[in-house]
Amino acid sequence: MRKSKKNILFKLLISAAAISLAVYLNRDNFKFPGWNNIEPTVKTAGMNQMNLYKDPENKITEMKDSTEKTDPVKLHFDALVADTHNDFLWQVYDKGADLNKRNSFTQSDIYKFREGGLDIQVFAVWIPMKKVKTSYDFTISQIDRLREFQTLSNGQFEIAGNYDDIIRITGEKKLCGLIGIEGGTAVENDAENVKRFFDMGVRYIGLTWNNSNLIATSAKDAVLNGKKGGLTEFGKEVVKKMNGTGMLIDVSHLSEAAFWDVIEISTQPIIASHSNCYSIDPHYRNLTDEQIKAIAKGNGYIGINFYDEFLAPDGKKNGADIEKIIEHIDHIKETAGIDFIGIGSDFDGGISPPRDLRDATQYPELTKRLFEKGYSPDEIRKILGLNFLRVFKQVCG
Ligand SMILES: [Zn+2]
């Protein structure tokens, strides 16, 4: 009896020592149950070479690690991953979401971004119809919320203003944020507001959302409501102001007539931050082959949207899977080339994503599928982030 008690005590001591040692050795990643701070990083794959691989300038010459050729997960976590459209800020306003916490009701937050290997997120400020009359002020209040998250992030999240910032912030293994505006109503009736927003850190403005505004007619109004017109005179002034300021022009949600006006006027590459291919899914939110070619001709960028309704004609009814995203990527590659494709998930913008890509933790699944489809590591790195960075650097500096 006495002997077995001793045995149990001995085993308990050994177990306690083993646990302490495990915690010590893995102290950077160890999480106590209920621990609510942000872990330093969950990116362990390829950690040693991360800075090297994540430096886009070195992407080709230094890519010597043969394991990346056989391991898409390693490739994913080594690559710079950027998503050019996310509506988390709306979830903050509407439901009190917290970027620095794990939210049960959102498709993204800092934990999910980290688990999904995401490095750069453009946070879009979306303006609800009830705020249209005070768009400018509402936009500023949403930007302030994002900056507040930076302050409270314990050094885990930082908003970038230029390309060098992005490289530094991602090199420091923080989540890098960028600010976009979804809807030119934010500019109200003063083109000088473009510069004011730029000074606040905004780097793209979608000229319209679903509602038309003083700048242009939206795709929804043109197609569903028969509204005519492209860019207004004021819209042309805004486009010129954006070109002169280093503000990216986002044509997602824009009517075709306005799109072609932008193509005619803009002296800079343009982006469609979250749009897909019309020839696969003929939805007014998607781009025709002519539009895709025009964006590519101007050296621009298209971020693939994960919303099943924009992925497949029957997507709203039957859902979609990652295979559909790959189809859109294939199509842009065939139509215009590999250099113009990226990710613009639209997470937390009220979308229902593919069943095998439910939230931001699952970005690696996309890389796996691209890999299986025969995309090379260099092509995958372009899609995951380098294409957007190229355009961002050219336009925003
Ligand atoms: Zn949108």
Image (cartoon, helix red, strand yellow):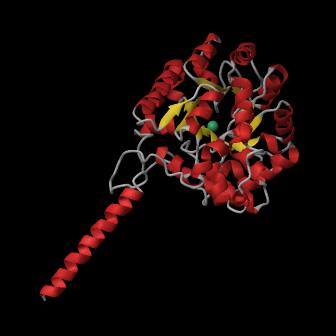
Image quarter where the N terminus lies is: bottom left
Q: Residue lying farthest left?
A: 2
Q: Residue lying farthest bottom?
A: 1
**How far across and down, in percent of the image, does residue 62 sit?**
73, 46
Examine the rendered structure and indicate whether residue 142 appears above or below residue 26: above
Q: Splitting the image into 4 quarters, where does residue 45 fall?
A: bottom right
Q: Nearer the viewer, residue 364 or 20?
A: 20
Q: Residue at x 61, y 47 (%)?
A: 50
Name the side, left or right, on which 349 lies relative to 392. Answer: left
Q: Residue at x 58, y 50 (%)?
A: 48
Name the side, left or right, on which 7 lies relative to 141. Answer: left
Q: Nearer the viewer, residue 341 or 260?
A: 341
> Which image quarter has ligand 1?
top right
Examine the rendered structure and indicate whether residue 109 appears above or below residue 247: below
Examine the rendered structure and indicate whether residue 387 appears above or below residue 264: below
**How far across and down, in percent of the image, does residue 106 sit?**
48, 47
Image quarter where the C terminus lies is: top right
Q: Residue at x 56, y 31 (%)?
A: 126
Q: Quick check: can you spot residue 396?
A: yes
Q: Residue at x 48, y 27 (%)?
A: 142
Q: Splitting the image into 4 quarters, where does residue 193 fall?
A: top right
Q: How many marks?
A: 0
Q: Splitting the image into 4 quarters, where does residue 263 fall?
A: top right
Examine the rendered structure and indicate whether residue 104 appears above or below residue 10: above
Q: Nearer the viewer, residue 163 or 234?
A: 163
**How far across and down, in percent of the image, does residue 135 sit?**
53, 21
**How far across and down, in percent of the image, does residue 5 sit?**
16, 82
Q: Nearer the viewer, residue 379 or 13?
A: 13
Q: Quick check: can you spot residue 279?
A: no
